[in-house]
Image (cartoon, coloured by chain):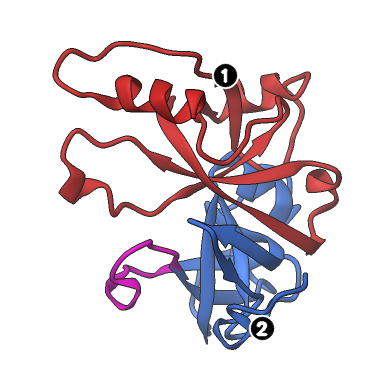
Amino acid sequence: MFLGKVIGELWSTRKSTDLDGKRLLVIERLAMDPSEAEVTPVVAADPLGADVGEYVVVAFGKAARVAFGGDGDFAFEAAIVGIVDGGHVPSKDWFETYKKAQES
Amino acid sequence: MYLATVIGQVWATRKETTLSGLRLLVVQPFKRADPDNASTMVAVDTIGANVGERVLVVMGRAARHSIGKGHDIGFQCAIVGVVDGAEIDGKRLGQTAEDDGASST
């Protein structure tokens, strides 16, 4: 489970039927060191309706499957389980700038 | 689940028996910076992707499920979708690198 920022969205027609009707968002994990922020972004299914630019909590594995209403077998393993309203990490200004972005 | 580009195909004759009949593709995960320096992965193709196409790659149980041989398979990485397009950091990505910047989906 990690805290990330929605940086984009993607569309797919030829895909596993398990992914039908699911919104897929591209999410970048928040990194303590900006130089480590170039990690591979994760694609997560979104049951909540997050927007680009919002901070989200992403769960993997069983937690992600449960977020879609059960522990069935799905052909994806990452899902958004929370949209962040605010927070505080003393050493970083993530949420301070986030709030500004929301107000503007 | 990751966004990746198919960069090639790989064949193997001597392999784990549960892998027989599976199409193995070499994929390169998408990175926001330095795209040429990304590591590569081998993924089972369940959807019929071609070299150059952008795809969705899943790992672990989701991958074994989509490969469709129950859960007993010696592999944990699979392609579950071909991406039509994406918008990341406000930039358009197409199905292939050549389609980048195209205005319609």
Q: Secondary structure at mark 1?
A: strand
Please give left or right for residue A58 compared with residue B101 in the image: left
Q: Chain letter for mark 2, please.
A: B
List x then y, in percent, for residue B71: 66, 42
- Say which residue appears at 27% left-offset and 47% top-offset: A37
Segment colored magenta? B29-41
List x then y, in percent, for residue A56: 51, 27
The disc labelled 2 sits on which kind of residue? Asn
**Can residue B38 be found in the magenta stretch?**
yes
Please give left or right for residue A3 compared with residue A90 in the image: right
Quadrant of the image for the C terminus of chain B? bottom right
Q: CA distance from mark 2 to mark 1?
A: 35 Å
Residue neighbourhood size for the residue with mark 1, other residues' Cα within 10 Å, grouped as few (<14), some (14–19), many (≥20): some
The disc labelled 1 sits on which kind of residue? Gly
**Can residue A98 be found in the magenta stretch?**
no
List x then y, in percent, for residue B44: 60, 66
- The residue pinned by badge 1 equals A82
Asked if A29 appears above or below A55 in the picture, the reply is: below
Marks 2 and 1 share the same chain: no
Chain drawn red in the picture: A
Residue neighbourhood size for the residue with mark 2, other residues' Cα within 10 Å, grouped as few (<14), some (14–19), many (≥20): some
